[in-house]
Image (cartoon, coloured by chain):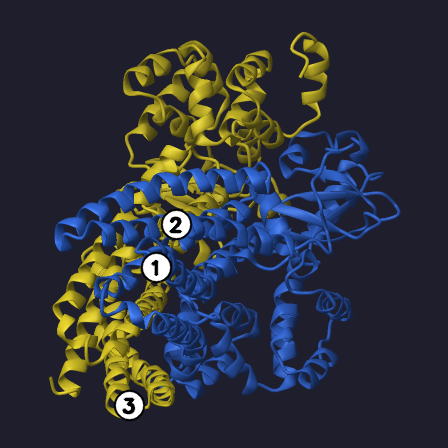
Chain colours: A blue, B yellow
Amino acid sequence: ILKQDNETLLGLLAEEHHADIAELLEDLNLEEATYIIKLLDSEITSDILMEMDEDDREKVLKNLSSKEIAKELDELDTDDAADMIAELPEERQEKVISKIEDEEHKADIKELLKYDENTAGGLMAKELVKVYENWNVLKCVREMRAQAEFVTRVHSIYVVDEKEELKGRLSLKDLLVTSTKTHISEIYIPKVDSANVHDKAEDVARVMQKYDLEAIPVVDDKNHLLGRITIDDIVDVIKDEADKDYQMAAGLSQDVEADDTLWQHTRARLPWLFLGLLGGIGAASIMGGFEDLISKHAVLFFFTPLIAATAGNVGVQSSAIIVQGLANNDLKGSIGERLFKEFSLSLINGLALSLFLLLFTWIWKGNMLTSIAISISLFSVIVVAGIIGTFIPLFLNKRDIDPALATGPFITTSNDIFGILIYFWIAKMVLGI
Amino acid sequence: ILKQDNETLLGLLAEEHHADIAELLEDLNLEEATYIIKLLDSEITSDILMEMDEDDREKVLKNLSSKEIAKELDELDTDDAADMIAELPEERQEKVISKIEDEEHKADIKELLKYDENTAGGLMAKELVKVYENWNVLKCVREMRAQAEFVTRVHSIYVVDEKEELKGRLSLKDLLVTSTKTHISEIYIPKVDSANVHDKAEDVARVMQKYDLEAIPVVDDKNHLLGRITIDDIVDVIKDEADKDYQMAAGLSQDVEADDTLWQHTRARLPWLFLGLLGGIGAASIMGGFEDLISKHAVLFFFTPLIAATAGNVGVQSSAIIVQGLANNDLKGSIGERLFKEFSLSLINGLALSLFLLLFTWIWKGNMLTSIAISISLFSVIVVAGIIGTFIPLFLNKRDIDPALATGPFITTSNDIFGILIYFWIAKMVLGI
């Protein structure tokens, strides 16, 4: 990178999309990135900054003055501006806000900062096109042209009454096809889905997906129009939710990316590994308690990894199905019905697997009684693990805890221990010791 | 449900959104659902059918005549119509297509059926608003009104030359603000992202997400405009991809929902459980080979579940991070760098966990040599599992196999066996037997 030749550099970058420049900057070192950000116009850099990875953006922002940041914010939509400010340390937030020049923009951003980031309020932008029901189409088009300058994309035009209460919506298409003298109140569509400002982000995502909406207006408890949420923000919510569930299932305790530091990786991975270790120690202690079996029935000990693994697998499978069902909101029937279905399923799977194991161990070791003991244990473990795997996420969900926790190492580890305990207990009974 | 009183029923349903009616029908039995579909106007029922679960829709379609289905298709956008036809048995497809009345619609649907469903061609719709660069704004608005009737939502207006080659786009907003005599060639935006009709659906999703697009035009190899893809279809692609990865990680071998039949569940779950069982039998055989150890060092056998579980956990963690990095396209650096990073990380995690285990086993059993053997084994297993977990998904990806396979039971099971083998092998060496 030629640091000297600003003209050439600007020329080169002018051709690129801001998302591509953002990727480029992430590959540069901090000074170079800051240098380029300062060189470019804030109209472009604000978009570039929004596209950058959160960690990288934070570092660049640290190198900018409050005034420079305020300038970037002036160029951003209110929702993006609020998101960016929220990442700064608190004392810095106030300084930056005080430097924003546009008073209305400032007030909007301040309002958005009040909402929790996982609610409709935290997702919405204040930019929208709004018309009053007593206007006619001509006035409407004129006002819209003025308003549309501040709105990146016009999805729907929202219709409000004089109290700012949401009445309905207009489509640009309808507006194109109607005579200019028509009153808005005659042509607007009164049926409009809206989200309450305190709704959970996930719920808004679900509604927008279900009804295929590209934007949804956000209202307060009194139906006053506050802002709107667009589908691109919802795409991020859906992606984040899915990533979170996936990481949970893979035993990562926090959001971690391949390019994060070793320290971040250690923090994300070590806790669950440690939990797994404790589980393993628990299993070892249990087996220690059955040490007297070892002289007569050493073969029992050979099958502990099999029992533990199967318990874990069955549990994760049934939990994952429930977690996905909850996420997609398509679980029907009562908990009892669910558990009964899982029970029937475990009977089928358990029978198939334990009969196979019975045959194998019998042929291998030739001891029918031990084989029966191992197979009955496997069968019981599968049934118990399946029921626990179904029950835990439903239970967590009832308690308003993220049910995806149930697919994580916590439950897997418990299932392992539980499985081994059942195994030796049943084996001891069957073998009559 | 009153089957007699059609009037009342129609009145009730008229108030509901088609997505809600679809949910309602899924809860009814097949005859009732078919009855209601036949009762309602095809303008509404086509939307209802599209919102229904694939399995339920299939059943209802079986009860409709080819002509009735053709009527539904007439009401749908080409992309949805093609999707619906693709679900029918092949002989039926032709019958239904021949009954579609609108010749242009029929030709469009036939064209779309040629594309693979996982490509841009399989996602796109033929409906779009297209203007020629030599038109002026007035002509453009007039033609658009006519075209817009067939397009559910206007996102962008695409500009083509007389050879139908894509030149750029117009925003509705710009059109609102320009005088009617201006030529399109003067005001269109020549920079427009487009997708090739053979691009993979995932790649299109990535581009649209990266550039925050709400619609993207689809072209053939010669840049002829063929159709467009809208963000709502992309939302489904993203969701499906994420679900697939999640199911893979949870050990479900095919897409299965909580409400599917027992048989479908068994087919999705039993294969991986069986694989796990074979793995367990493998582990048991390995341990059988070390049976001579059992008399002197029974404690070694107590720790096999711990070793196997840790190997599995470490492997899944590192695979999951690579799989997510690949999915989000943000992996940088060579395979070598990646492996080195994972190696360093395994050293840290391995050291922490094995030191803890060393202390515990020493205090518990008081035999320093056994404790050292167990801890060194744990350490080695963590390092090996981490490296395998990183390497396998990168390798699969190079071979164009879905890397998410690496987070599934196949690798976990191999890691288990591998871990136990390393464990006993190292233990034997350290204990000098």
Answer with left or right where residue B287 lies relative to residue A386: left
Q: What element carries label 3?
A: loop
Residue B373's image quarter?
A: bottom left
Q: What residue type is labelled 1?
A: Lys
* Amino acid type, mark 2: Ser
Q: How crowded is mark 3: few (under 14 residues within 10 Å), some or many (20 or more)?
A: few
Whether the residues at callouts 3 and 2 have beta carbons within 8 Å, the answer is: no
Location of the C terminus of chain B by quadrant is bottom left
Q: Which mark is residue B367?
A: 3
Between A192 and B392, the one lying in front of the other is: B392
Q: In which quarter of the image is residue B335?
A: bottom left
Q: Position of residue B110 (x, y in %)?
A: 32, 24
x, y percent for residue A290: 34, 69
Tell me, yes or no, if residue B133 can be seen here. Answer: no
* Pick the front one: A192 or A393: A393
- Chain identifier of the residue bearing label 3 in the image: B
Q: Give the mark toward the camera: 2 or 1.
A: 1
Residue B279 position in % (x across, y down): 22, 57
Task: Name the chain under label 2.
Answer: A
Q: Quadrant of the N terminus of chain B?
A: top right
Residue in view at x 49 percent, y 61 percent: A244
Which numbered disc covers residue A428? 1
Mark 2, residue position: A380
**Mark 3 → mark 2, Cα distance in angstroms:** 35 Å
Report the Cα–Cα distance between label 2 and label 1.
14 Å
Looking at the rendered structure, the kind of residue marked 3 is: Asn
Q: In this view, does B339 lie above or below A30?
A: above
Residue at coordinates 64% horizontally, 75% vertically from top-left? A85
* Chain letter of the residue beneath label 1 in the structure image: A
Of badges 3 and 1, the one in the foreground is: 1
